[in-house]
Amino acid sequence: MDTDNLQLAGLLGSRICHDLISPLGAIGNGLELIQLALARDLPELALAREAADAASGRLKFFRICFGNAANGEQITHAELASILDARFAASRITVSWQSAPSVMRVEARACLLAVLCLETALPRGGEISVTQHQDGWHLVARGAGLRLTAPGWQILGVSATTTATTAPAAPTAREVPFLLLLAHGAGKAPLIETGEDMVEIHLPALRGRR
């Protein structure tokens, strides 16, 4: 995917998220009004409100992850931490974010794509840490039963554990985060290190890229 197509994909993601955020907010407001009218909190309402909050959290995450990132645009550490907390609130995976008070949104987008990639390696849950360094970003995933068998890892150059000789299948929607992360590096895969219970992705500084 070249730069023009990458920008087009980001604009498409931004448009979809923009069109969905308002109705999701309206659903949440409607549920609150129903609760006030009934003067009590029904289990059904609590379940619906929880689902609406989860959907809103995912949408905010996707807006950064798949949306457009203009040159020079920044996002705060606090906002990113809040977005990650909402996205993984009901997950067995915890994500910590350590960075400067504000970072380039294009770099945050690449990091969130990498987080989605690392999520596939933690089928039994675990921890993902995102840390900003002078030379870029280091993301580390740790957890029991860590696996790098998802086809997307081959896109990033990680050898498959199978000995099958069949040609790799065409990419599916599950491989989108891997494809976009590769595109962020202009077709060059990030440095990836693996261990028995950990995998680490090193992302160079991406300032100025779209």
Image: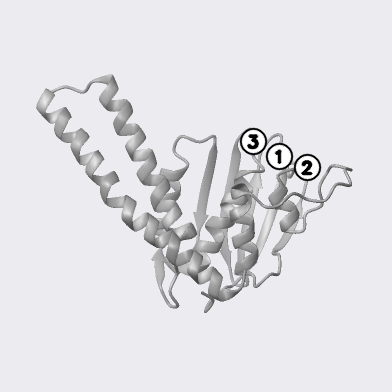
Which residue in the structure is indicated by mark 1? 146
Q: CA distance from mark 3 to mark 2?
A: 15 Å
Label pair 3/2, CB-CB below 8 angstroms: no
Q: CA distance from mark 1 to mark 2?
A: 8 Å
Looking at the image, residue 29 lies above or below residue 19:
above
Circle 2 — which element?
A: loop
Coordinates of residue 130 in the picture (x, y in percent): 56, 56
Coordinates of residue 18 in the picture (x, y in percent): 33, 57
Q: Which mark is residue 196?
A: 2
Q: What's under tag 3, amino acid-wise? A: Pro
Q: Earlier in the sequence, mark 3 or mark 1?
A: 3
Within 10 Å of disc 3 (Cα), the crowding (few <14, some 14-19, many 20+) is some
Looking at the image, residue 90 lies above or below residue 156:
above
Q: Earlier in the sequence, mark 1 or mark 2?
A: 1
Circle 3 — which element?
A: loop
Tell me the residue at 63%/49% (across/down): 172
Label pair 1/2, CB-CB below 8 angstroms: yes
Residue 82 makes an appearance in the image: no
Q: What's under tag 1, amino acid-wise? A: Leu
Tell me the residue at 64%/56% (across/down): 178
Which residue in the structure is indicated by mark 3? 123
Q: What's under tag 2, amino acid-wise? A: Glu
